[in-house]
Structure formats: C-alpha cells, structure tokens
Amino acid sequence: MPSTGGDRILGIFRDQPAGMSDLDRRSFLDKLGVFSATALFASLARAEGRSPASLADDETFWAHVRESFVLTPDLIDMNNGGVSPAPKVVIGAMKKNLDLSNPAPSYYMWRILDKGREPLRKDLARIAGCSDEEIAIQRNTSEALETVIFGLPLKAGDEIVLSKQDYPNMLNAWKQREMREGIKLVWVDLELPSEDNDYLAGQYIKRFTDRTKLVHVTHVINWNGQIMPVRQIADAARPRGIDVLVDGAHSFAHFQFTIPSLNCDYFGTSLHKWLTACIGTGMLYVRKEKIPELYPLFSAPDPRADDIRKFEHLGTRPFYIEQAISQAIGFYEMIGAARKEKRLQFLKNYWMERVAGIPTARLHTSMKASFGCAIGMVSVEGRKAIDLENFLLEKYRIHTVAINWENIHGLRVTPNVYTSLKDLDLLVKGIGEFARS
C-alpha cells in the first residue's frame, strides 16, 4: 500500500491548518495531548532518507512510536493478531466524537458525523489502491465476508472451493448455505507452514471444475501467519469464470499490497487489527462490475443497485467509532507502510531465531518475507500449547493464544509496532524456561 511518509503527520487531524511550520505542527499535537509529538516528529524527520530495512532494528525510532500508545504496565500483549490497541490519536478522536454526538445524537450523528463517511471512503480506497466506489464501511471481517457469502446468487450443485484452515465464522456461513440450499463445499486441507507457492495454489486449482462458482482464500492464515499466494490462485480462477473472495482480516495494513493487485472480486477486512482503528470497524471491497449481482446482507431500497453504499444499511451504529478510522489511517501513513512491514518482519524473526535454538521448540511459521510477516507460531515437544500460554501469562504476564485447529497446533505470538525487543527477550526467556521445566 502506498504511503506518503513522515510528513503525513499533517493529515492526522482533518481540521489541522495546511502550511504549518514544523514548530507549529509539534505545538498543535502537543496541545491536543495526543502523544509525545516533539520526540516522534523529530524521529520521523531523522528517518527521512533512510531505508525501511535500516530502521527495522532502530529501537530509538520505534520507542517513540511506542509512546503513541497507552499500554498497561502489568501485561505484555502479544496477541495483536486478535485485535490491536488503537494509538492515542485514534482513541482521542473517538472520545471527541462521542462527546460531540451524545448530547443530541440524532442531530450530531446523522447531520454532522455522517458527513465524514465519503471522505473516509476515499481515504480507505486510497490506501487500498482502488476506487472509492468499490469500498463499503463495515464493522468487522465477518460482516464484510458474510455479505458476500450470503449475498451471492447460488443454487443447488454450485461448488465453492475453500480450506479447512479458514476462519470458523466463514466456514460456518458457507456450511449454512450448504445446509439450506444444497451448494457443494469442496475442501482443501493445507499442510502448513509452506514455502512453496505452487503447492499452496495447486491445492485450490486442482479442485476447480466447470461447477465451481467461487474460491474462498484466506490471505494470511490467522492460526500461524502463513501468507497465501492469492494472486496465483486468482489468476487461475478468473479466466474460468470463478469468482475470488479474499479474507483479508490479517493482511490489510499489515504488509504492502493493493487490493486490485490480488485480482480478486471481493475482499473483507477488519480495521481494528493492523490498521489499529477502534474496535468494531471493518471494510468490504467489491469489484465495481460485481456490485449489482450481490445482494446486501441487510435490506436496501434497491438490492440490485450498482452503488457500493447499498451494503451500508446497517441501521443505527456508533458513528463516533467509525469516524475515528480517519485518524488510524493518518497514523498508519505517518509511520509508513514499508517501515511498518519491515519492523513487523524483524520482530517476528527476532524471537523465532532465538527460540529455534531451544532443543525441544518447534517453529510453525516461515521466516521468509514472502510467506510470513508479524504472526509466528511455536510449540514445545511433548507439551500442550495451552500450558505454555498459561505459563507465560502467570509467570511473565505475557498474553499469547494457544491454537488447536485442524492440523495446526501451537502458540501464536503476534507483536506489533509498539513491541520492544526487551518484551521479546522476556518471551524467549519464558519459552526456554517452560521447555526445560
């Protein structure tokens, strides 16, 4: 995804005056009490001209980013794959929006805050690399993807290719359509981790038939962080007239790509994960020519309209949360997409390289950039992952999550841009101690 670099700090607040001097910018942010603006702005200025790779292990730079978050002192959160904390600037915007709307919500929500939806749609489309007429604002990945799953016109005998390693909410949605309408689910069972894109793509492609209507692909397998070759699968599917639905819950704003570069028809994501927006924010992409044939999940005046907005008839919802997404986009672009990606890869490989030296430890995520980014998985021979999870939480106050799904078993560890090497050193120490006990 494209980034405008450090100077994107100007866009964190929509009402910030243009043409401000560096001193004015720092003063503006400091007065708002958003974060330690002087240190972070100076750090961003020093970073200009340096490659993202050279900044990946610069603890001074990332310490200033860490200051942008409010972190609890009694817990080290390494389950950002579930949901990420939002930075101060995002939480501040959400609170400001709530304070504005609460005294007269019907007026301020629908006549003031709701006017921010179209600018927000354009901002999301810009970082997604697509038209704003292809972006609908949703509340999470499940809502976005189930809009597609339940909205597609399918009939008995139509085939859907999907993986046993996909997210349960999506699998259950497809199973419901199978139960009610007699569509056929064709299952892929992946052996992970893998560093062979031909193998990964081939497991889907060899199951395509003249009855296949759609292939459902998870961009990043949430259990262990495996990056899937979505484009390779899509390039084989679309010439056959097969639609491509991508679960992008863990890829959007995690590493660099544009949605059109995936050659997919539909894409759903949560913005409260890697974009670090407030909890309960998501996004749906529908290729423009596919909009008329897709029915909305919630009723719209014209369900066959070609307007992406027909997917936003959700009833009353928290506008104060939705409109804070803009600040999350500003924060993301301020750090820079390339810098973020390199830092996350560095953090994952940092702890995994050290854990690899523990005799009974086994890694279940690739350290190659093409196959993994922030999410990593580890197990200890002869021990249960849930016991390792409990040990790290009770002894070191490190929050992770044990995974026991299909053929994937281990402890998922997911740092974020605010994670320090000191935190990861403690993680490695804890895993080592558990393995030896």
Image: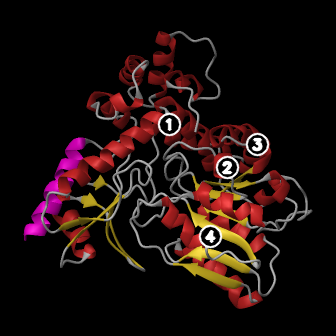
Q: Position of residue 205 (x, y in %)?
A: 62, 70
Figure check: 227 above or below 275:
below
Q: Position of residue 349 (x, y in %)?
A: 29, 49
Task: State the separation of the CA atoms marked 3 and 1.
Answer: 20 Å
Give the residue at x 52% y 52%: 251
Q: Amino acid at mark 1?
A: Ala
Numbered badge on residue 205? 4
Q: Nearer the viewer, mark 1 or mark 2?
A: 1
Q: Crowding at label 1, few (<14), some or many (≥20) Cα neighbours within 10 Å?
A: many
Give the residue at x 41% y 24%: 37
Q: Nearer the viewer, mark 3 or mark 4?
A: 4
Task: State the separation of the CA atoms marked 3 and 2.
Answer: 19 Å
Q: Mark 1 falls on what kind of element? A: helix
Numbered badge on residue 132? 3
Task: State the separation of the CA atoms marked 3 and 4.
Answer: 31 Å
Q: Quadrant of the N terminus?
A: top right
Stretch of the chain drawn in magenta: 421-437
Q: Mark 4 falls on what kind of element? A: helix
Task: State the separation of the CA atoms marked 1 and 2.
Answer: 27 Å
Q: Earlier in the sequence, mark 3 or mark 1?
A: 3
Report the side of 355 relative to 252 (left or right): left
Marks 1/4 in contact by CB < 8 Å: the verdict is no
Q: Earlier in the sequence, mark 4 or mark 2?
A: 4
Of residue 199 and residue 234, the one placed in the foreground of this image is: 199
User: Is residue 74 something one can see in this rendering?
Assistant: no
Give the residue at x 64% y 78%: 173
